[in-house]
């Protein structure tokens, strides 16, 4: 039995589908059973990472766990998962982390990922960290301003990122969850080409068939928008610190890791757009 935490999200859904596709028994840990639609054969465990007893119940009989967490409580929540992995004697854990966890970890966001990785190494389980570069799906944050004013706003958008298709992150996770040889590994996952935000905006404009403006948004404006959207100021600052990093070694250069793990080339941004571009017109 493989437990998937974060199963209803962008990467988690793909991990569940990938594991089912390979015939593995999967238990999806979700907050809301009503929103869970994983298809036949997927067991659903309803719980919340802020309630350790629900995490413990979800671990019953688990051989392996995939974990991702989001938000300011991520490190605390992953410490709970680590404790239940240890207590339950789970054999293998794969964590979705970030290139921001590379030493020295960047800001509170990178440090939270690094801290969670350390917690998992102490569980006694075989542990693999997947440090992903920026997701291609982040461009969906531009939908509202594209719809309203044909303009993309991005902070630190001039820094090239080897953006990755979340489906490739999931494919790498499925391999690490189901095959031997990945214990103790820290894998850095990227897509096949480095793109700036203006370059991504140009590709979206081509898809939409109309020009889009590009504005490099000041950090202060981005921080204000994030806190207005409900994020604590310190957490927003941590995300921006990670985004500000110009070091190409942290997700700015394409790496062969996805191909090495999965045996196939990672998807390019145009391929991702061809599958998800309709989301810019359907809202
Ligand atoms: N975006 C990037 O560029 C990037 C790059 C590298 C690494 N990462 C990492 O990727 C992870 C995010 O992955 P994602 O994009 O797949 O996330 P996502 O789409 O936002 O999904 C997050 C999932 O976690 C669930 N969740 C949230 N709080 C929970 C709680 N308290 N208890 C149980 N479940 C909870 C959500 O459940 P509901 O469906 O109930 O809301 C949702 O299904 C983060 O760790 C991030 O740091 C992201």
Image (cartoon, grey):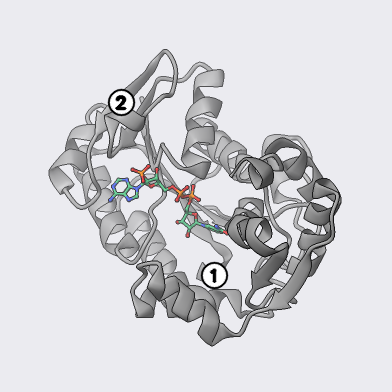
Q: Position of residue 51 (x, y in %)?
A: 16, 48
Q: Residues within 10 Å of mark 1 (few under 14, many from 20)?
A: many
Label 1 or label 2, whichever lies nearer to me, is 2
Q: Considering the image in quadrants, where does the N terminus appear?
A: top left
Residue 231, position as x, y percentages in the image: 37, 69
Residue at the image position 75 percent from the left and 57 percent from the top:
255
Of 247 and 63, the residue lying toward us: 247
Q: Residue furthest left?
A: 53
1 or 2: tag closer to the N-terminus: 2
* Helix, strand or loop at mark 1: helix
Residue 227: quarter of image: bottom left
208 with respect to 74 (left or right) = right
| Picture disc at residue 110 | none
Residue linked to disc 1:
100
- Observer-nearest residue: 268 or 111? 268
Can you say whether 126 is above or below 195 in the image?
Answer: above
Circle 2 packing at 10 Å, graded few (<14), some (14-19), many (20+), is: many
| Cβ of mark 1 under 8 A from ligand 1 | yes
Q: From this viewpoint, which residue is outermost toward the top?
A: 40
- Residue at the spot of label 2: 44
Give above or below for 88 relative to 238.
Answer: above
Q: Position of residue 155 (x, y in %)?
A: 63, 77
Residue 172 falls in which quadrant of the image?
Answer: top right
Image coords of residue 29 (percent x, y): 32, 35
Residue 32 in sight here: yes
Q: Residue at x 35, y 55 (%)?
A: 120
The answer to whether 271 appears left or right of 26 in the picture is right
């Amino acid at each position: 039995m493989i437990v998937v935490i974060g199963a209803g999200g962008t990467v988690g859904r793909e991990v569940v589908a990938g594991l089912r596709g390979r015939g593995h028994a999967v238990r999806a840990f979700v907050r809301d059973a009503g929103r869970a639609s994983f298809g036949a054969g997927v067991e659903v465990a309803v719980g919340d990472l802020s309630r350790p007893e629900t995490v413990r119940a979800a671990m019953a009989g688990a051989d392996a766990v995939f974990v991702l967490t989001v938000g300011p409580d991520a490190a605390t929540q992953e410490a709970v998962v680590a404790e239940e992995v240890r207590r339950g004697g789970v054999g293998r854990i794969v964590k979705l982390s970030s290139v921001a966890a590379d030493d020295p970890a960047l800001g509170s966001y990178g440090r939270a990922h690094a801290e969670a990785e350390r917690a998992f190494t102490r569980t006694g389980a075989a542990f693999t960290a997947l440090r992903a570069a920026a997701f291609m799906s982040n461009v969906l944050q531009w939908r509202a301003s594209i719809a309203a004013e044909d303009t993309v706003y991005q902070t630190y958008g001039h820094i090239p990122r080897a953006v990755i298709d979340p489906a490739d992150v999931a494919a790498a996770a499925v391999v690490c969850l189901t095959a031997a040889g990945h214990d103790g590994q820290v894998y850095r996952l990227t897509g096949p080409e480095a793109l700036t935000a203006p370059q991504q905006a140009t590709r979206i404009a081509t898809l939409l068939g109309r020009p889009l403006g590009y504005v490099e948004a000041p950090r202060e404006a981005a921080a204000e928008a994030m806190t207005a959207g409900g994020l604590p100021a310190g957490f927003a600052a941590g995300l921006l610190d990670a985004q500000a990093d110009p070091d190409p070694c942290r997700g700015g250069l394409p790496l062969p890791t996805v191909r090495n793990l999965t045996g196939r080339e990672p998807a390019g941004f145009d391929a991702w757009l061809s599958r998800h571009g309709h989301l810019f017109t359907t809202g």
